Image (cartoon, grey):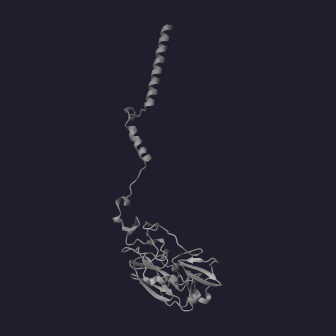
Amino acid sequence: MSRKSSTTNLATLFLGLVITSTASAAPCGDVALEGQCNGSVREYCNAGELQSEACEACCGWDGDRYDCIEACPSNGDCIEECLDGVNVFGCSLLNTHEWTCEKGPAGCTVRVFSMCPPGEICDESSTNACRPTSEVDLCSGIGASGECKGSIFKRCIDGQLVSTDCSGQGKACTSTGCANCSDECIAGDTGCESSGKSWDCVPSAVTNCLVRVAKNCSGGKQCFDGRCVYVDDMPQNEAEPSVIMDAGSLNAVADPAAEAATSGCQTSGWAPDTMRDGLLAVMSTLLGFLLFTRIARRRD
């Protein structure tokens, strides 16, 4: 995915940042590190300054932040920014903002960010809301080895929370820190999630590794073969799937017809073996009767 020259300094963005020293500043207003989309323009906070980038395709949520993406939703479709629906809230990647999820105009959930007031920080350890910095222990629950929050690797050093933006290094956040990422899918692949969303396999704007980007199928559309389509446009053999039988099933169906095509004795209810046994029994009875009659006459 191509990037504008205005983002070449992204590699130095918030590396090794001590959160408590910058949380009260938030010079970008309600625009957090995650940024926001203004039409096809991406706006984001870079080293305390509001930056903008004109996207070649479109601007959208990539699962971690707002960025220029290539897998743009079609008309009437949108990207879910909150997988758990509305009435969900949390803290921004750098704890400078709190956010809530609302239903957007296109029908998908969107994140609404609000900057914490001066002297406050978003407490992700308990309330997921802005609180006085002196009352927040951001190291609570974070182990000595650190942990990931999106693309941010967080760890505590001497009681201070230190956050490193792995995406600024073109890497992914792992359990041991920032490291080279691995592809989640094969380039060009598409599919449908169990939730009914479609997904595309595209390069991440941050790490350039292949990731799945999900899109919500709205406006009466359903996911088919990785695309959001109207039900009327789906192939008939998909809307009404035919029954596919294997060779064994076909043989099982054909056997009764083959049996019905045998001799007339079969159709009358007589099987060949049964008829033979019956004739032998009748013949044995007749022979026995003749022998008995001949013996009786000799005695007379």
Q: Residue 45, can we see it?
A: yes
59 or 97: nearer the eye? Answer: 59
Task: Spot the residue most to the right.
Answer: 158
Question: Image height check: is 57 above or below 269?
Answer: below
- Residue 288: x and y in percent read 48, 17
Q: Residue at x 34, y 60 (%)?
A: 236
Q: Residue at x 38, y 60 (%)?
A: 238
- Residue 5: x and y in percent read 43, 83
167 or 38: nearer the eye? Answer: 167
Question: Image height check: is 243 above or below 4?
Answer: above
Number of marks in the rendered image: 0
Considering the image in quadrants, where does the N terminus appear?
A: bottom left
Q: Residue at x 47, y 13 (%)?
A: 293
Task: Spot the residue most to the bottom.
Answer: 118
- Residue 235: x and y in percent read 35, 61
Q: Residue 197, can we see it?
A: no
- Residue 190: x and y in percent read 43, 67
213 or 217: nearer the eye? Answer: 213
